[in-house]
Image (cartoon, grey):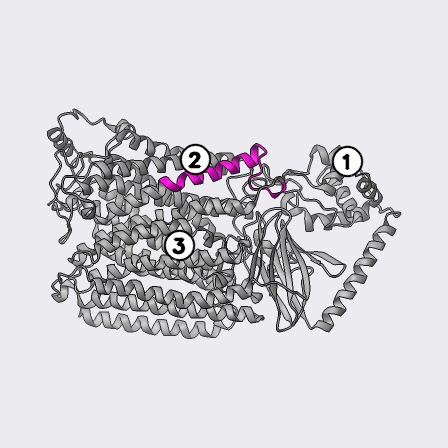
Amino acid sequence: MTTTTDDTQHDSHADDHHEHHIPYGIKRWLYTTNHKDIGTLYLWFAFIMFLTGGAMAMVIRAELFQPGLQIVEPHFFNQMTTVHGLIMVFGAVMPAFTGLANWLIPMMIGAPDMALPRMNNWSFWILPFAFLILLSSLFLEGGGPAFGWTFYAPLSTTYSADSTALFVFAVHIMGASSIMGAINVVVTIFNMRAPGMTWMKMPLFVWTWLITAFLLIAVMPVLAGAVTMVLTDKFFGTSFFDAAGGGDPVMFQHIFWFFGHPEVYIMILPAFGIISQIIPTFARKQLFGYASMVYATASIALLSFIVWAHHMFTTGMPVAAELFFMFATMLISVPTGVKIFNWVATMWRGSMTFEVPMLFALAFIVLFTIGGLSGLMLAITPVDFQYHDTYFVVAHFHYVLVTGAIFSIMAAVYYWLPKWTGKMFHIGLAKWHFWCSLVSVNVLFFPMHFVGLAGMPRRIPDYALQFADINKWISIGGFAFGLSQLIFLVLLVKACKKQGEPVSNQVWEGAEGLEWEIPSPAPYHSFETPPFVK
Amino acid sequence: MKKILFKAGTMLTALITVGVFAETKEKIGQYQLNMTKGVTDISADVYDMHMLMFIICVMIGAGVFIAMFISMYFHRKSRGAKPANFHENVKVEIAWTVIPFIILIAMAVPAMNLLIDMEDASEPDVTVLVTGSQWKWHYKYMDNDVEYYSKLATQADQISGKLDKGKNYLLEVDRPLVVPTGQKVRFLITSDDVIHSWWVPAFAIKQDANPGFINDAWAIANEPGVYRGQCAELCGKAHGFMPIVVIAKEPAEYDKWVSEQEAVQQEAKEKEQRLLSMNMTMAESMLMGEKVYSANCAACHMPNGEGLPGVFPALKGSQIAVADQPKHIDILINGVAGSAMQSYAKQLTMSEIAAVVTYERNAWGNDTGDLVQAKDINSAMNEQ
């Protein structure tokens, strides 16, 4: 995945007279301002975090394998669910998308690099420290955050351990990193498009990331505000969320979800972009409804600001507010549906082949649709009273985040990896990875719908006997899904060692776009002189 | 050859699937896979609405997947499919924007009507104040002189696996809430500390208990019976261990139960006054104190009194528990502001508080020899 080999360095000597040498070893990675190096760092960091958060999920599933408390204390269990969520959201999915943006946006729009390379370096290198701080809090007296990744006050204020201060600081750093990454994306796309690359010619991955970047800039400061209020409520005697001091605990949820719902789309819009790149390639047919895809993405982003309280139907809002948020939420399924119909129409009467990226993309469409439809069910307020805070919700958001966001990231890695390394990855391992993941992820998350409907609340370390059999299957699926990711690890290590058959510039028959016109592996600086887009 | 193997494989898979289904079908009777229909008109409506949404979603999903699998099968390169050229079609695009919109309106209208019915808690026959606190529920009948705490009744040994788990493992409480059938019961829901959520699936009620604010919900139970639920909002360490049990009784039986409870609670108050003049021996006090401690204190301060460092302070060897007795009693009566330690003045009788203070001052090697009596607690309360 890197460009460390001798010949690429020669290439870059030849390509770039200013760049006299690339530093070796650790310095290269610490000082790098190259979009590809930083993209690689982001992607490996995301993968390490994915395995770390996954290990916590294994602890959760091991404890839930059978009723009773066997392995961990409830207090530690709560820390596991909390940190699992935080790591997967802020450490795995978001950095992976930023890594893909770094690698791909300059190559797709015909730019030599990102617009703000030093800020790019900084936005990555503060991230590992944020997560070191967060993870180290687990080893402090009183343990790490144990109030759920949503950190509802007053559980996270008056009733939390002192390590909450570290949690707040870590979230601040993650937020700063995300904002810098987003600004970089916006500036790059606005200023560095090649001549002829008009707005409506931009690849959809670029479009979806542009919209995502605006969402990030809009809502990460809201999250920063929420954690700061938690900090001052806990340590400095304010009462933002304490009724006894004139505050309101429900106000916390309004602020949090005003960030939280756009955040959900931050984690899925780039996925829509990836799928819109992959499906046309392997259907050998132009994407159906390009313009409506762009408008649908923009509508989803705008709607995401007026639906936040559908996470809060049970908090006792007035009926009028419940109705408004129900209608607005249901409305989101229209543009989302348009996207899915467009993908299906792209495949319709195409000439399809099923290479590994396509397998993940197809699995994405089916499983994301399931997650989207359960989301529509959750939008119906009177029924949501029964679904809310049960495993039905857990099933829903894991379908959209694991088989949605994460499957799209895997599809993207398989799709562009040969371009990055210049070698085809190990197809046998990749197929094993896909099929093992596909089967196990459904054994893991599908039965959660049933235990949720039958009445199992989420975030509990122990449960009533009627849920025992299904939970055993869920855990088995969980362990299998966890193990399947080790196949991916082996494959990635082999790919980074440059093992495999050399590939052509185009890599995939049917792939179109600027990134497929430059050599494989992609040179250190993609476009020294901008290409002209017809 | 490959084709024959493939066919054999498919048939084998089909046979196994049928076998597994046949086996699970017999077992399915034991546990539930779908939402409960519940025992109120509203909960039945909610169930119907859920099934309607579910069927619509399955149909939409099936339509999408069928179209997708048709192209995956027929429009494959390996079957010689040549790609078509179309990439937009305004009519189709308008159709698949407008039709879903119409379906959504068809879903939204009945949902709106149901929601408006659910939120109308006016003109109740009985009102119960439900207060969540870490990690138990308190019920207070607003029209009668009855109030009590309701706590998990499952033994700790069942949770740790030392004893076999009972039928209602984690879904049983010491004192269930009792409501009359056929009458509109309004629940006023609030909290003493963090946010909890009072969830009884059979009534289709899930309402957050917010500290400092009061929410309401209502139910008319159509059938007598025992209905179980759980706290649904993460509320700390023992969130998984604060179940809800509601018993619905015929109105006549309910009235009888209420007057019994009023009498019992009245008698308990009188008894407590009488007990003020009586002294317990150390042995009695330690025995009672240990019981009170394991039911109320052990969840945080742990059975060995060592607490959870950084979250719940240790009592073993603590300055308050071995030296400052007035402070010790004060904490039990008033709680500690800004912490998870709540006031026990309402939750325990004076003699129980006295016993548990005695126990904490003499257990785990604290060995102070202090013996606190109910009257000490009474005078501490009166001083305020």
In this figure, which residue is indicated by the disc labeled 1?
B325
Compared with residue B31, is residue A434 higher up or lower down, i.e. above or below? Answer: above
B28 in magenta = no
Do marks 2 and 3 both belong to one polypeptide chain?
Answer: yes
Judged by depth in the image, the label closer to the viewer, 1 or 2, is: 2
Residue B54, image quadrant: bottom left
- Horizontal relation, residue A61 to residue A32: left or right: right
Q: Nearer the viewer, residue A468 or B333?
A: B333
Residue that appears at 56% across and 42% down: A241
Q: What amino acid does circle 2 point to?
A: His
Cα distance between the residues tagged 2 and 3: 25 Å
Residue A398: which disc? 3
Give coordinates of residue A18: x percent, y percent.
15, 25
Q: What amino acid does circle 1 point to?
A: Gln
Do marks 1 and 2 both belong to one polypeptide chain?
Answer: no
Q: Say if residue A146 shows up in the picture.
A: yes
Q: Secondary structure at mark 2?
A: helix
| Magenta stretch in the rendered image | A217-244
